[in-house]
Every structure is written in C-alpha cells, then in structure tokens.
Image (cartoon, coloured by chain):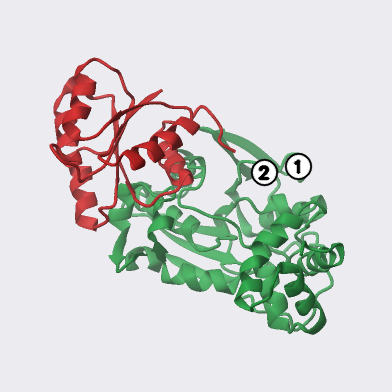
C-alpha cells in the first residue's frame, strides 16, 4: 500500500518538530525509501502500516528511529573533492600565515554522518599541516546510531570504494576481515559527539574551520539564517566556513564574504559575533523535553 | 575521451565499458594485458585504462609496468579494477605506477568518484 497523506503528514510533522528539517509534499518517496528497512525489520507489510503503528502505539525510541532514518545524510570520502582541495590550497595556508607554524587548528565537522567527512579532513591535514602545527576535529551529528559507527571507523569494501583515493586507503586504513578500519592515529584526532544544530553550539569552540555541508538545504530560510548567525558566534573572527556545493550564505545571512577557491567557494565572517553577545535564537520547534535526540547533546 | 577496458571476462568488460560510456567515454576493449599493449602500439590514443589484475597471457600488474616504462604513454591514467583486495596488493599496484585502485564489486557511483579524483571529470551526467 502506498504511503497515505495522513502517514506522510505525521512523519513530516515529527521530523520538523525534532530536527526542523522540512519534508515538503512530494517527498513521499523519500519517506518510503528511508523507512522501508525499519518496516521490514518489524515484519510490517509496507511503510504505511509501519507509520500507522508508530503513530498509534509508538514509543519514544520508535520516534527517534524515524527521525534518524529521515535525517541521516548520504556520505562518502572526499565527497565533491573541492572542499578538501580548498583545505590544502587555501584554508591551511591562510590560517598558518595568520597563526604561525605551531598553530593548533580547531575544526568542527557538523552533521558528520558515519564519519567519512571528518576522517577525510584528518587525512588532508596529515598531508598539509606544517610539522609543528596540529589540529583537533570535533565531529557531530544528530544521530547516535551513525556516531557509533563513526567512532569505530570501520567501513565496508563498498564504502571505501566511494571517493577514497587508493593511496589514502593503504596509508590510513587497515584490513579487518571483510572491512577496513581507520588508523588509531587518525581516530585520535577526531572526537565524535551528538549535537543538534538547533541546540546551542558545542562548547569546544571557537573554531578556525567549520564544515557544514549539505545540511542547510533541508532547512527553511529563517532556520538557515539563525544557524549561520550562531556559527559566526562560535567561529574565530577570521575563521573559514565550508558549505555544500549547492549552498550559500548569499541572500540568507549577509555577514559573510564568499571567497572563490578552485572549483568551489568558502565563506568568512565579515561581522563576527563575539561569544558573549547573544545571537538570534534559532526558532525552536515544539520539543518534547524528554526527547533523547535533542537533550543528549554533549556540550 | 577514450578509455581502454582490459579484463578477461567479457561480462565484466561490458559492465565497465557501459559505466564509462554512461559517463561520456568512448571505449575500446582488450582481453588481457598483451592485447591491450597491441591496442596502444597500434596508435589508438586513450586517456584512461581500466585494468583487471588476474588475466591469462599478461596480467594487469605487468601491463601497468610496461605502460609506465614507455614515455610515450606517460599521459595515460591507469586504474586497476579487480577483486584483489589485500592491502599489500594495492600497495604493489600503486608502486608499479597505477594511479587508482577500485575493488570489485563496485557501483557506477564509485567509478565516477574515482574519475573525479583523477581529474577525469565525466562530460556527461548520468542522473
């Protein structure tokens, strides 16, 4: 049975309240494809039956699973490549010139999914940081499920085929049976924490570099603006923001300068907000106070 | 752009060639390393070779070494596409001169990602 309008409305409302992500009418296919595995796992004949069961008798944990299934982004190593070549050609040289050869760069990879992005950042930094400089990477995601996988750093053969240069594979990962695992050295550079972009930013800032890719596209303009304003508050005044290829600050929050780098762009705050000035509050959806998705953030 | 697909399995050649064709490549095929060298020696210009490892007559690793030894073929990008998945084998192939290494089974998306890394940006969108 196809997904009914009621079921879609229930899922869209749940996802909007928990993550502020908008599932517009027309995204029924996305709900069906993302929830099919959960429905099958419980022996339900189709997605509509599963959604009905969650709606009528679902526990908090069922709601969390639905939200996680709909908000987990597809990811791969060095996805789009330009954001990583920018790290090497522009971001690191700029920041090292400003901070000196022994700088310690503080990087935030937001919405990191199963970890390929922060590990790709770590591999690139291993290649291009001057020997006296160092970096730490905070990687966050809404979903505890993906973070558990990310922390282990274990990937299937199909996953390591996707965008990871062979030279990086043999240098930074080792075979573990049918899987590959990221080296302990690289895993030590990355700290994984649960975080919802609607919550106050992680206390680990201020950040020199923030990667927030393919996330803003899911939000409405007010939420995008509020998230960008908050980012300015947790970034160093000369910090650098990397967005997804289809995303921009232009027309959303005019306090950023776009800097073309190679095939893409990065953004720098033109009006940084001091940390003690309260930025506009992110519009808060109605949130159940006990929601583990929103309250378990480790700040 | 033209690619040479080298694999002793006709089915695998068809899969790889089909994927490359969808990405905008013209393709030529060869069933082992020796036949592939014949193609290159005949003067057919290719930008990319996709090379299986285990083949009769001449295996993929030897083919890579032969291509790298000839300065006239320096511009050719070499990508292994093989079921061999041991770390040591990947290291050997890269040391012999392969630019990339893709492990079977693979998806069209994985081929596209590797070509992107190699700067062989496909001219035709698949989506």
Residue A36, compared with residue B102, is above or below; it is below
Chain assignment, label 1: A
Q: Is residue A163 left or right of residue A21?
A: left
Q: Nearer the viewer, residue A92 or A63?
A: A63
Q: CA distance from mark 2 to mark 1?
A: 14 Å
- Which chain: red? B
What's the residue at 30%, 18% (across, down)?
B45
User: Which of A5 and A261 lies nearest the eye of the viewer?
Assistant: A5
Please, is residue B43 above or below residue B59 in the view? above
Q: Taking A171 as reference, is A22 left or right?
A: right
Mark 2, mark 1: which one is toward the viewer? 2
Between A138 and A26, the residue placed more toward the observer is A26
Write down the residue under mark 2: A247
Q: Which mark is residue A254?
A: 1
Image chain in green:
A
Pointers 2 and 1 within a single chain: yes
Question: Residue at point 71% right, 43% down?
Answer: A249
Question: Is residue A298 among the parts visible in the rendering?
Answer: no
On the picture, is B127 further left or further right than A98?
A: right
Give neighbour class at mark 2: few <14, some 14-19, many 20+ (Cα, 10 Å): some
Q: Is residue B65 visible?
A: yes
SS state under label 2: loop
Pick the quarter of the image with the C terminus of chain B.
top right
Q: Position of residue A184 (x, y in %)?
A: 33, 68
Judge by depth and name the residue closer to the eye, B91 or A219: B91
Element class at badge 1? loop
Q: Earlier in the sequence, mark 2 or mark 1?
A: 2
Q: Position of residue A96 (x, y in %)?
A: 43, 46
| x, y percent for residue A156 | 40, 62
Can you name the residue that lies furthest to the right here? Answer: A6
Q: Quadrant of residue A183?
A: bottom left
């Amino acid at each position: 049975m196809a997904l009914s309008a009621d079921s879609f409305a229930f899922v869209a409302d749940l996802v909007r309240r928990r993550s502020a992500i908008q599932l517009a009418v027309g995204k029924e296919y996305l709900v069906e494809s993302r929830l099919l595995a959960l429905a099958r796992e419980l022996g339900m004949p189709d997605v509509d039956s599963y959604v009905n069961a969650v709606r009528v008798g679902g526990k908090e944990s069922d709601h969390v699973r639905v939200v996680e299934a709909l908000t987990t982004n597809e990811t791969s190593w060095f996805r789009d490549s330009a954001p990583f070549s920018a790290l090497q050609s522009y971001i690191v040289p700029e920041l090292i010139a400003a901070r000196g050869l022994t700088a310690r760069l503080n990087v935030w990879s937001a919405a990191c999914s199963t970890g390929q992005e922060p590990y790709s950042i770590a591999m690139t930094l291993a290649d291009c940081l001057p020997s006296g400089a160092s970096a730490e990477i905070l990687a966050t995601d809404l979903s505890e499920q993906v973070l558990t996988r990310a922390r282990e750093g274990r990937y299937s053969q199909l996953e390591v085929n996707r965008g990871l240069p062979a030279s990086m594979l043999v240098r930074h990962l080792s075979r573990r049976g049918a899987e590959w695992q990221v080296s302990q050295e690289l895993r030590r550079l990355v700290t994984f924490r649960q975080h919802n972009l609607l919550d106050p930013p992680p206390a680990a800032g201020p950040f020199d570099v923030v990667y927030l890719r393919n996330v803003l596209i899911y939000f409405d303009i007010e939420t995008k603006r509020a998230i960008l304003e908050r980012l300015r508050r947790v970034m160093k005044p000369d910090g650098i923001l990397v967005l997804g290829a289809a995303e921009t600050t232009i027309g959303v929050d005019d306090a950023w300068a776009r800097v073309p780098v190679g095939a893409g762009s990065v953004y720098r705050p033109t009006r940084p907000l001091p940390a003690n000035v309260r930025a506009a509050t992110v519009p808060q959806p109605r949130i159940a106070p006990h929601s583990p998705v929103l309250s378990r953030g480790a700040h | 752009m033209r690619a040479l697909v080298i694999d002793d399995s006709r089915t695998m050649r068809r899969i790889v060639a089909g994927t490359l064709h969808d990405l905008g490549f013209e393709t030529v095929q060869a069933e082992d390393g020796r036949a592939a060298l014949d193609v290159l020696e005949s003067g057919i210009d290719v930008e990319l070779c996709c090379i299986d490892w285990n083949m009769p007559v001449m295996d993929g690793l030897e083919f890579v070494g032969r291509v790298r030894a000839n300065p006239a073929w320096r511009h050719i990008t070499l990508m292994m596409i093989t079921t061999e998945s041991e770390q040591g084998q990947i290291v050997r192939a890269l040391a012999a001169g392969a630019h990339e290494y893709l492990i079977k089974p693979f998806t069209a998306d994985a081929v596209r990602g590797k070509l992107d890394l190699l700067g062989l940006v496909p001219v035709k969108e698949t989506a």
